[in-house]
Amino acid sequence: MRRLVAVPADLDEVIDQSGREVDPALVGMDTRAIERIWRAILALYRTGTQPGIAIVVRRRGEVVLERAIGHARGAPMQRGWSAPEAIPLRHDTPFCIFSVSKAVTAMLVHLLDDRGVLHVDDPIAEHVPEFATHGKERTSIRHVLTHRAGIPSVAGNNDPELLVHWDRVIDLLCDAHPTSVPGRRLAYHAVTGGYVLGEVIRRATGKRIEQHLEDELARPLGFEWFRYGVPPGRETVVAENVFTGSPIPAPLAFLVKRALGVSFEEAVRISNDARYLHAVVPSGNVVATAYEVATFFDLLRQGGSIAASSLRGPAAEGHGEVSIFSPRTVRRALTESSYLELDLTLAAPVRYGLGLMLGGDTLSLFGPGTPSAFGHLGFINVLGWADPEREISVAVLTSGKPFLGTHLVPLVQILRTIAHEVPKTGAPRVGSRMPRAIR
Protein backbone atom coordinates (compact mmCIF):
# COMPACT_ATOMS: atom_id res chain seq x y z
CA MET A 1 0.00 0.00 0.00
CA ARG A 2 1.24 3.46 -0.87
CA ARG A 3 1.80 5.76 2.07
CA LEU A 4 0.98 9.39 1.27
CA VAL A 5 0.38 12.69 3.01
CA ALA A 6 -3.16 14.10 3.02
CA VAL A 7 -2.71 17.32 1.02
CA PRO A 8 -5.16 20.07 2.06
CA ALA A 9 -7.35 21.70 -0.59
CA ASP A 10 -6.16 25.15 0.50
CA LEU A 11 -2.35 25.11 0.46
CA ASP A 12 -2.20 28.53 2.10
CA GLU A 13 -3.04 26.72 5.35
CA VAL A 14 0.36 25.00 5.33
CA ILE A 15 2.66 27.64 3.79
CA ASP A 16 5.16 29.71 5.76
CA GLN A 17 7.16 32.59 4.28
CA SER A 18 10.07 34.26 6.02
CA GLY A 19 9.26 37.85 5.09
CA ARG A 20 12.95 38.43 4.28
CA GLU A 21 12.84 37.86 0.54
CA VAL A 22 14.31 40.78 -1.39
CA ASP A 23 12.86 42.19 -4.59
CA PRO A 24 14.20 39.84 -7.32
CA ALA A 25 14.70 42.82 -9.63
CA LEU A 26 17.54 43.98 -7.37
CA VAL A 27 19.55 40.91 -8.38
CA GLY A 28 18.58 40.64 -12.03
CA MET A 29 15.57 38.37 -11.70
CA ASP A 30 11.85 38.61 -12.34
CA THR A 31 9.17 38.13 -9.68
CA ARG A 32 7.35 35.78 -12.05
CA ALA A 33 10.46 33.58 -12.21
CA ILE A 34 10.45 33.24 -8.43
CA GLU A 35 6.78 32.31 -8.45
CA ARG A 36 7.36 29.69 -11.14
CA ILE A 37 10.07 28.12 -8.97
CA TRP A 38 7.69 28.17 -6.01
CA ARG A 39 4.91 26.58 -8.09
CA ALA A 40 7.33 23.76 -8.90
CA ILE A 41 7.75 23.22 -5.14
CA LEU A 42 3.97 23.18 -4.72
CA ALA A 43 3.70 20.54 -7.45
CA LEU A 44 6.09 18.30 -5.53
CA TYR A 45 4.08 18.81 -2.34
CA ARG A 46 0.83 17.90 -4.11
CA THR A 47 2.21 14.42 -4.86
CA GLY A 48 1.58 13.57 -1.21
CA THR A 49 5.10 12.18 -0.83
CA GLN A 50 6.42 15.12 1.20
CA PRO A 51 5.22 15.95 4.72
CA GLY A 52 7.32 19.11 4.49
CA ILE A 53 9.52 21.03 2.05
CA ALA A 54 11.68 24.08 2.70
CA ILE A 55 13.49 26.04 0.00
CA VAL A 56 15.92 28.93 -0.05
CA VAL A 57 17.38 30.51 -3.18
CA ARG A 58 20.15 33.09 -2.89
CA ARG A 59 21.05 35.17 -5.93
CA ARG A 60 24.15 37.39 -5.86
CA GLY A 61 24.18 36.89 -2.10
CA GLU A 62 20.58 38.01 -1.51
CA VAL A 63 17.71 35.74 -0.44
CA VAL A 64 15.05 35.88 -3.17
CA LEU A 65 13.04 32.85 -2.05
CA GLU A 66 12.63 31.50 1.49
CA ARG A 67 9.48 29.51 2.10
CA ALA A 68 8.21 26.24 3.50
CA ILE A 69 5.13 24.10 3.06
CA GLY A 70 3.67 21.25 5.05
CA HIS A 71 4.28 19.91 8.53
CA ALA A 72 7.39 19.42 10.62
CA ARG A 73 5.84 16.55 12.56
CA GLY A 74 2.64 14.58 12.59
CA ALA A 75 1.57 15.34 9.03
CA PRO A 76 -1.95 13.98 8.37
CA MET A 77 -1.72 10.85 6.25
CA GLN A 78 -4.08 9.25 3.73
CA ARG A 79 -5.83 5.88 4.02
CA GLY A 80 -6.00 5.63 7.76
CA TRP A 81 -2.32 5.96 8.57
CA SER A 82 -2.30 7.31 12.10
CA ALA A 83 -0.33 10.43 13.01
CA PRO A 84 0.08 12.48 16.20
CA GLU A 85 -0.89 16.11 16.41
CA ALA A 86 0.37 17.98 13.37
CA ILE A 87 3.05 20.65 13.86
CA PRO A 88 3.34 23.17 11.00
CA LEU A 89 6.63 23.47 9.15
CA ARG A 90 8.31 26.85 9.32
CA HIS A 91 10.83 28.32 6.92
CA ASP A 92 13.43 28.08 9.69
CA THR A 93 12.66 24.53 10.83
CA PRO A 94 15.89 22.50 10.94
CA PHE A 95 16.21 19.27 8.94
CA CYS A 96 18.73 16.48 9.04
CA ILE A 97 20.52 17.06 5.72
CA PHE A 98 22.00 13.55 5.54
CA SER A 99 24.75 13.23 2.91
CA VAL A 100 24.87 16.95 2.23
CA SER A 101 26.88 16.70 5.47
CA LYS A 102 29.69 15.16 3.40
CA ALA A 103 30.33 18.51 1.72
CA VAL A 104 30.57 20.19 5.12
CA THR A 105 32.97 17.58 6.50
CA ALA A 106 35.07 17.68 3.34
CA MET A 107 35.50 21.44 3.61
CA LEU A 108 36.75 21.09 7.20
CA VAL A 109 39.42 18.72 5.85
CA HIS A 110 40.33 21.16 3.07
CA LEU A 111 40.56 23.99 5.61
CA LEU A 112 43.11 22.03 7.65
CA ASP A 113 45.03 21.22 4.48
CA ASP A 114 45.17 24.93 3.73
CA ARG A 115 46.67 25.52 7.18
CA GLY A 116 49.27 22.80 6.74
CA VAL A 117 47.88 20.64 9.55
CA LEU A 118 47.37 17.75 7.15
CA HIS A 119 47.43 17.13 3.42
CA VAL A 120 44.75 15.46 1.31
CA ASP A 121 47.35 13.05 -0.07
CA ASP A 122 48.50 11.92 3.38
CA PRO A 123 47.95 8.21 4.02
CA ILE A 124 45.25 7.74 6.65
CA ALA A 125 47.75 5.63 8.57
CA GLU A 126 50.04 8.64 8.95
CA HIS A 127 47.46 10.04 11.36
CA VAL A 128 45.73 6.82 12.46
CA PRO A 129 48.49 4.16 12.50
CA GLU A 130 46.14 1.27 13.34
CA PHE A 131 44.36 1.84 10.01
CA ALA A 132 47.34 0.30 8.18
CA THR A 133 45.97 -3.26 8.02
CA HIS A 134 44.88 -5.62 5.25
CA GLY A 135 46.34 -3.56 2.43
CA LYS A 136 45.12 -0.15 3.60
CA GLU A 137 48.62 1.21 4.28
CA ARG A 138 48.48 3.54 1.28
CA THR A 139 44.83 4.53 1.53
CA SER A 140 44.85 8.32 1.56
CA ILE A 141 42.57 11.13 2.67
CA ARG A 142 42.00 11.84 -1.03
CA HIS A 143 40.77 8.28 -1.55
CA VAL A 144 38.17 8.77 1.17
CA LEU A 145 37.06 12.17 -0.16
CA THR A 146 36.58 10.68 -3.63
CA HIS A 147 34.88 7.43 -2.52
CA ARG A 148 37.81 5.29 -3.68
CA ALA A 149 39.07 3.98 -0.35
CA GLY A 150 37.45 0.57 -0.75
CA ILE A 151 35.51 0.82 2.53
CA PRO A 152 31.93 1.62 1.44
CA SER A 153 30.49 -0.17 4.46
CA VAL A 154 31.42 -1.88 7.70
CA ALA A 155 31.22 -5.42 6.42
CA GLY A 156 28.98 -7.78 8.37
CA ASN A 157 27.77 -5.15 10.82
CA ASN A 158 24.36 -3.62 10.20
CA ASP A 159 23.57 -2.71 13.80
CA PRO A 160 22.09 0.82 13.65
CA GLU A 161 23.18 1.55 17.21
CA LEU A 162 26.76 1.16 16.05
CA LEU A 163 26.60 4.64 14.50
CA VAL A 164 26.56 6.33 17.89
CA HIS A 165 29.67 4.52 19.17
CA TRP A 166 32.54 6.40 17.55
CA ASP A 167 35.48 4.37 18.87
CA ARG A 168 33.81 1.08 17.95
CA VAL A 169 33.22 2.25 14.37
CA ILE A 170 36.85 3.36 14.08
CA ASP A 171 38.07 0.00 15.40
CA LEU A 172 35.94 -1.84 12.82
CA LEU A 173 37.12 0.36 9.97
CA CYS A 174 40.74 -0.04 10.99
CA ASP A 175 40.30 -3.81 10.95
CA ALA A 176 38.27 -3.85 7.72
CA HIS A 177 39.42 -5.57 4.54
CA PRO A 178 39.05 -3.16 1.61
CA THR A 179 36.73 -4.31 -1.16
CA SER A 180 39.17 -3.09 -3.80
CA VAL A 181 42.67 -1.66 -4.15
CA PRO A 182 42.50 1.90 -2.76
CA GLY A 183 42.12 4.41 -5.57
CA ARG A 184 40.99 1.89 -8.18
CA ARG A 185 37.20 1.70 -7.96
CA LEU A 186 34.51 4.29 -7.35
CA ALA A 187 32.03 3.07 -4.73
CA TYR A 188 30.07 5.61 -2.67
CA HIS A 189 30.93 5.57 1.03
CA ALA A 190 27.52 6.39 2.50
CA VAL A 191 28.59 6.52 6.14
CA THR A 192 32.10 5.17 6.67
CA GLY A 193 34.18 7.94 5.10
CA GLY A 194 32.98 10.58 7.52
CA TYR A 195 34.17 8.62 10.54
CA VAL A 196 37.60 8.13 8.99
CA LEU A 197 37.93 11.83 8.16
CA GLY A 198 36.68 12.80 11.60
CA GLU A 199 39.24 10.56 13.28
CA VAL A 200 42.03 11.96 11.10
CA ILE A 201 40.98 15.48 12.14
CA ARG A 202 40.93 14.47 15.82
CA ARG A 203 44.36 12.86 15.67
CA ALA A 204 45.89 15.72 13.65
CA THR A 205 44.53 18.55 15.81
CA GLY A 206 43.61 17.05 19.18
CA LYS A 207 40.11 18.48 18.74
CA ARG A 208 36.96 16.61 17.77
CA ILE A 209 35.34 17.31 14.43
CA GLU A 210 32.15 18.71 15.97
CA GLN A 211 34.20 21.41 17.69
CA HIS A 212 35.85 22.31 14.39
CA LEU A 213 32.42 22.70 12.77
CA GLU A 214 31.31 24.92 15.62
CA ASP A 215 34.45 27.07 15.64
CA GLU A 216 35.24 27.32 11.94
CA LEU A 217 31.82 27.50 10.28
CA ALA A 218 28.72 27.62 12.46
CA ARG A 219 29.75 30.42 14.82
CA PRO A 220 31.49 32.70 12.29
CA LEU A 221 28.46 32.49 9.99
CA GLY A 222 26.01 33.12 12.83
CA PHE A 223 24.17 29.83 12.39
CA GLU A 224 21.81 28.66 15.12
CA TRP A 225 21.91 25.06 13.90
CA PHE A 226 24.40 23.64 11.35
CA ARG A 227 26.00 21.15 13.73
CA TYR A 228 26.41 17.40 13.77
CA GLY A 229 23.15 16.36 15.41
CA VAL A 230 21.41 18.38 18.12
CA PRO A 231 21.74 18.73 21.89
CA PRO A 232 19.56 16.42 24.02
CA GLY A 233 16.06 17.81 24.34
CA ARG A 234 16.04 19.56 20.96
CA GLU A 235 15.45 16.54 18.74
CA THR A 236 11.70 17.21 18.61
CA VAL A 237 12.33 20.53 16.86
CA VAL A 238 13.92 18.77 13.88
CA ALA A 239 11.64 17.91 10.94
CA GLU A 240 10.55 14.29 11.21
CA ASN A 241 11.42 12.05 8.28
CA VAL A 242 8.67 9.80 6.94
CA PHE A 243 8.84 6.82 4.60
CA THR A 244 6.28 7.54 1.88
CA GLY A 245 5.36 6.22 -1.52
CA SER A 246 5.31 2.59 -2.60
CA PRO A 247 7.17 -0.40 -1.16
CA ILE A 248 10.59 -0.92 -2.73
CA PRO A 249 10.90 -3.90 -5.12
CA ALA A 250 13.30 -6.60 -3.94
CA PRO A 251 16.17 -6.02 -6.43
CA LEU A 252 16.29 -2.30 -5.66
CA ALA A 253 15.86 -2.94 -1.95
CA PHE A 254 19.03 -5.05 -2.07
CA LEU A 255 21.04 -2.26 -3.73
CA VAL A 256 19.81 0.26 -1.16
CA LYS A 257 20.69 -2.00 1.75
CA ARG A 258 24.15 -2.56 0.29
CA ALA A 259 24.71 1.21 0.14
CA LEU A 260 23.22 2.10 3.53
CA GLY A 261 23.93 -1.02 5.54
CA VAL A 262 20.27 -1.26 6.56
CA SER A 263 16.95 -1.34 4.72
CA PHE A 264 15.55 1.90 3.35
CA GLU A 265 12.67 1.92 5.84
CA GLU A 266 15.05 1.20 8.72
CA ALA A 267 17.31 4.07 7.63
CA VAL A 268 14.33 6.44 7.80
CA ARG A 269 13.43 5.16 11.26
CA ILE A 270 17.00 5.53 12.50
CA SER A 271 17.17 9.12 11.22
CA ASN A 272 14.44 10.13 13.70
CA ASP A 273 15.94 8.24 16.63
CA ALA A 274 17.15 10.54 19.40
CA ARG A 275 20.37 8.53 19.67
CA TYR A 276 21.17 9.24 16.04
CA LEU A 277 20.31 12.93 16.41
CA HIS A 278 22.53 13.22 19.50
CA ALA A 279 25.48 11.46 17.85
CA VAL A 280 28.23 12.77 15.57
CA VAL A 281 27.91 11.17 12.13
CA PRO A 282 30.10 13.32 9.85
CA SER A 283 28.79 11.75 6.65
CA GLY A 284 25.16 12.05 7.50
CA ASN A 285 23.70 13.98 10.43
CA VAL A 286 24.36 17.69 10.13
CA VAL A 287 21.13 19.40 11.20
CA ALA A 288 20.50 22.76 9.52
CA THR A 289 17.87 25.09 8.11
CA ALA A 290 17.43 25.73 4.40
CA TYR A 291 18.86 29.23 4.89
CA GLU A 292 22.00 27.82 6.51
CA VAL A 293 22.56 25.23 3.78
CA ALA A 294 22.10 27.77 0.98
CA THR A 295 24.40 30.22 2.79
CA PHE A 296 27.13 27.59 3.22
CA PHE A 297 27.13 26.91 -0.52
CA ASP A 298 26.99 30.61 -1.27
CA LEU A 299 30.12 31.03 0.83
CA LEU A 300 31.85 28.49 -1.44
CA ARG A 301 30.42 30.08 -4.59
CA GLN A 302 32.03 33.33 -3.57
CA GLY A 303 35.43 31.74 -3.07
CA GLY A 304 35.28 31.23 0.69
CA SER A 305 34.25 34.72 1.82
CA ILE A 306 30.81 36.24 2.25
CA ALA A 307 29.61 39.74 3.06
CA ALA A 308 28.67 40.13 6.73
CA SER A 309 25.70 42.23 5.63
CA SER A 310 24.22 39.20 3.84
CA LEU A 311 24.24 37.10 7.03
CA ARG A 312 21.86 37.03 9.97
CA GLY A 313 22.15 37.20 13.72
CA PRO A 314 25.39 38.29 15.40
CA ALA A 315 27.40 37.64 12.22
CA ALA A 316 25.44 40.38 10.42
CA GLU A 317 26.64 42.97 12.93
CA GLY A 318 30.17 42.87 11.56
CA HIS A 319 31.58 44.88 8.70
CA GLY A 320 33.18 43.78 5.50
CA GLU A 321 33.47 40.05 4.82
CA VAL A 322 33.50 36.86 6.84
CA SER A 323 36.40 34.94 5.33
CA ILE A 324 36.74 31.24 6.06
CA PHE A 325 38.31 29.55 3.04
CA SER A 326 40.80 30.84 0.52
CA PRO A 327 39.72 30.71 -3.16
CA ARG A 328 42.50 28.18 -3.70
CA THR A 329 41.01 25.90 -1.06
CA VAL A 330 37.59 26.00 -2.70
CA ARG A 331 39.07 25.35 -6.12
CA ARG A 332 40.88 22.29 -4.77
CA ALA A 333 37.63 20.91 -3.37
CA LEU A 334 36.13 21.17 -6.86
CA THR A 335 38.97 19.34 -8.60
CA GLU A 336 37.29 16.69 -10.70
CA SER A 337 38.07 13.15 -9.59
CA SER A 338 35.59 11.27 -11.78
CA TYR A 339 33.69 12.22 -14.89
CA LEU A 340 30.37 10.37 -14.95
CA GLU A 341 32.14 7.18 -13.93
CA LEU A 342 29.89 4.33 -12.82
CA ASP A 343 29.64 4.33 -9.03
CA LEU A 344 29.56 0.68 -7.99
CA THR A 345 27.54 1.39 -4.85
CA LEU A 346 24.96 3.74 -6.36
CA ALA A 347 24.89 1.84 -9.66
CA ALA A 348 24.80 5.18 -11.47
CA PRO A 349 27.31 7.52 -13.15
CA VAL A 350 28.39 10.40 -10.90
CA ARG A 351 30.75 13.34 -11.34
CA TYR A 352 32.74 13.93 -8.15
CA GLY A 353 35.14 16.55 -6.86
CA LEU A 354 37.08 16.08 -3.62
CA GLY A 355 34.15 15.67 -1.25
CA LEU A 356 31.49 17.39 -3.38
CA MET A 357 29.33 16.32 -6.30
CA LEU A 358 29.74 18.27 -9.53
CA GLY A 359 27.15 19.31 -12.11
CA GLY A 360 27.19 18.80 -15.85
CA ASP A 361 25.78 19.95 -19.16
CA THR A 362 23.24 17.14 -19.45
CA LEU A 363 23.39 14.61 -16.62
CA SER A 364 23.40 16.70 -13.46
CA LEU A 365 21.85 16.61 -10.01
CA PHE A 366 21.48 20.39 -10.24
CA GLY A 367 19.45 20.73 -13.42
CA PRO A 368 20.37 20.90 -17.10
CA GLY A 369 23.15 23.16 -18.29
CA THR A 370 24.96 23.33 -14.93
CA PRO A 371 28.57 22.30 -15.69
CA SER A 372 30.01 24.64 -13.05
CA ALA A 373 27.51 23.75 -10.31
CA PHE A 374 28.60 21.86 -7.21
CA GLY A 375 26.94 20.61 -4.06
CA HIS A 376 25.61 17.36 -2.69
CA LEU A 377 22.58 15.11 -2.58
CA GLY A 378 21.19 13.86 0.73
CA PHE A 379 19.02 10.84 1.47
CA ILE A 380 17.03 10.64 -1.00
CA ASN A 381 15.84 14.06 -2.18
CA VAL A 382 17.63 16.64 -0.04
CA LEU A 383 19.77 18.98 -2.14
CA GLY A 384 22.17 21.83 -1.51
CA TRP A 385 24.21 23.42 -4.29
CA ALA A 386 25.69 26.52 -5.86
CA ASP A 387 25.84 27.47 -9.53
CA PRO A 388 28.46 30.17 -10.14
CA GLU A 389 27.33 30.80 -13.71
CA ARG A 390 23.91 31.80 -12.40
CA GLU A 391 25.30 33.40 -9.22
CA ILE A 392 22.93 31.34 -7.08
CA SER A 393 22.97 28.96 -4.17
CA VAL A 394 20.01 26.75 -3.38
CA ALA A 395 18.74 24.45 -0.62
CA VAL A 396 15.77 22.15 -1.12
CA LEU A 397 15.12 20.25 2.11
CA THR A 398 12.47 17.53 2.24
CA SER A 399 11.21 15.22 4.97
CA GLY A 400 9.41 12.69 2.78
CA LYS A 401 11.47 9.63 1.89
CA PRO A 402 9.85 7.95 -1.11
CA PHE A 403 12.08 5.71 -3.20
CA LEU A 404 9.83 5.26 -6.19
CA GLY A 405 6.70 7.16 -7.10
CA THR A 406 5.06 10.27 -8.42
CA HIS A 407 7.58 12.61 -6.81
CA LEU A 408 10.36 11.96 -9.31
CA VAL A 409 9.05 14.06 -12.21
CA PRO A 410 8.13 17.08 -10.02
CA LEU A 411 11.51 16.88 -8.28
CA VAL A 412 13.34 16.96 -11.60
CA GLN A 413 11.06 19.79 -12.69
CA ILE A 414 12.16 21.90 -9.71
CA LEU A 415 15.76 21.59 -10.87
CA ARG A 416 14.84 22.32 -14.47
CA THR A 417 12.78 25.33 -13.46
CA ILE A 418 15.57 26.86 -11.38
CA ALA A 419 18.10 26.31 -14.18
CA HIS A 420 15.69 27.81 -16.72
CA GLU A 421 14.39 30.76 -14.70
CA VAL A 422 17.72 32.02 -13.34
CA PRO A 423 19.72 33.54 -16.19
CA LYS A 424 23.41 32.82 -16.62
CA THR A 425 25.60 35.86 -16.14
CA GLY A 426 28.74 34.70 -17.91
CA ALA A 427 31.75 32.62 -17.01
CA PRO A 428 32.19 32.47 -13.23
CA ARG A 429 35.29 33.98 -11.72
CA VAL A 430 36.88 33.75 -8.33
CA GLY A 431 35.16 36.44 -6.37
CA SER A 432 31.90 35.70 -8.17
CA ARG A 433 33.35 33.17 -7.69
CA MET A 434 34.47 29.98 -9.28
CA PRO A 435 36.49 29.35 -12.40
CA ARG A 436 34.64 27.17 -14.87
CA ALA A 437 36.12 24.38 -13.13
CA ILE A 438 37.19 22.13 -13.57
CA ARG A 439 34.98 20.59 -16.07
Image: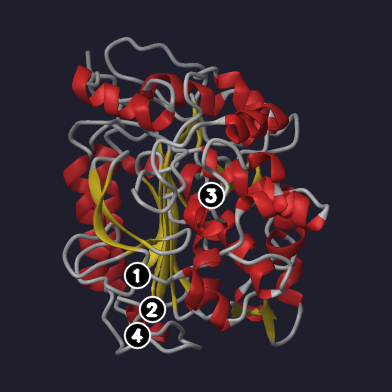
Per the image, label 3 sits on a secondary structure element best described as helix
Would you name the residue on which mark 1 appears? Answer: 373
Residue located 20% across and 47% down the image: 410
What amino acid is labelled 2 in the image?
A: Pro
Above or below, 430 relative to 193 = below
The residue under the point 35% across, 20% down is 77
Which amino acid type is marked by label 1? Ala
Q: Looking at the rendering, which quadrant does residue 371 occupy?
A: bottom left
Residue 28's label in the rendered image is 4
Give residue 255's position: percent from left, percent from top. Answer: 28, 28
Cα–Cα span, label 3 and label 1: 17 Å
Residue assigned mark 2: 388
**Which residue is rendered at x = 32% and y = 28% of the image?**
256
**What kind of element bears circle 2?**
helix
Query: Is the C-beta separation of discs 3 and 2 under 8 Å?
Result: no
Q: What element carries label 1?
A: loop
Decide: marks 2, 1 in contact (CB < 8 A)? yes
Disc 3 residue type (three-letter): Ser
Residues under labels 4 and 1: Cα distance?
A: 19 Å
Q: Name the residue under label 3.
A: 101
Q: Residue furthest right?
A: 206
Q: Which of 72 and 371 is in front in this view?
A: 371
Work out whether mark 2 precedes mark 4 in sequence or the reverse, and give the earlier one: 4
3D distance between C-alphas at marks 3 and 2:
21 Å
Badge 2 or badge 1: first in the primary sequence: 1
Distance between mark 2 and mark 1 Cα atoms: 6 Å
**Is 278 on the left or on the right of 285, as rendered?**
right
